[in-house]
Amino acid sequence: MLNVFSLIFYIIAFFLVLFYYFKDKNVIITLGILFTLIGSLLNFIFITIRWKELGFFPTVTFSDTLIFLTFITTIIFLVFYYIYRSSQVFIFILPFLILLMATALILSPTSTINIDKGSVLLYIHLPFSITGTALFFLSAFTGIIYFYLEKQLKNKNISFINKQNLSLESINNIINNLLIYGFIIFTIGLITGFIWKFYAENIEEYSYKTKLIFSVITWVIFGLLILIKKIKGLPPKKLAMGSIVGFVCLIITYIGLAIFLSGK
């Protein structure tokens, strides 16, 4: 039930942000932020309850993972908004959060994996992997904003430009930082996952190998993007496009993960 209410709050927040673009009143965007925050708080409460019920970190089902990913993405996004005050990202990220929550509700947890509850590595591996993924997602949405802002500048949309706090150059720097930090954090999660496997007992090999394969795919995709930028250099437009392409590939890997796990 908590997740249903969380989804409702995210939907309300999305419509408030849409309404903000017609009325342009700060109180509307403030309400949108408030409802988004309440949605994430409900996510946190659910994660805490689920953690207490299971006795270990609740990302042992695909639904659990999506809910935690929604929570982390929302928190990072709200910090992003607090720093840069760019409301445009709301338009792009809220539908994504709604999609994640709706999918999590459809794939409500029915079974869990028996894992080593006391492993410290597990508490590093899972949060770091998902946080890195959330940063990758946010880099893609920032890339979309880059193209949106570029289009508005070409069309000489003065009213939009006057409300925009970010320049194309600053957006490019943000994308670059999100990719680098996301890659570092995701790498830590991947490495600790490898190490954890050697000490874990009674873990289901099929599930572990499936998740590992798709984690490595994610790591390679964004690692190549960062490597190409480092060696050859990428102009801002291509970096933004690369982050979006990486996002699409990441979505495909998550769909593949869901299909494989549901076929156990």
Image (cartoon, grey):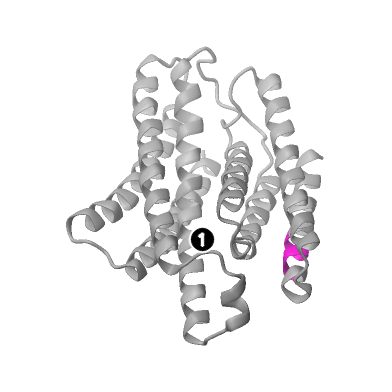
Q: Could you tell me which quadrant the N terminus lies in?
A: top right
Q: Is residue 174 left or right of residue 234?
A: right
Where 260 sits versus 243, above or below?
above
Dot 1 crowding, Cα within 10 Å, few <14, some 14–19, many 20+: many
Could one spot residue 256 in this view of the protein?
Answer: no
Residue 98 in the image, given as x and y percentages of width and height = 68, 55
What amino acid type is highlighted by mark number 1? Phe
Secondary element at image label 1? helix
Where 133 sits versus 153, above or below?
above
Q: Is residue 15 magenta?
A: yes
Residue 170 in the image, given as x and y percentages of width and height = 43, 61
Q: Which residues are magenta?
A: 14-18
Where 59 sits versus 95, above or below?
above
Closest to the observer, 234 or 2: 234
The residue that disc 1 covers is 141
Q: Is residue 154 magenta?
A: no
Residue 202 in the image, given as x and y percentages of width and height = 47, 17
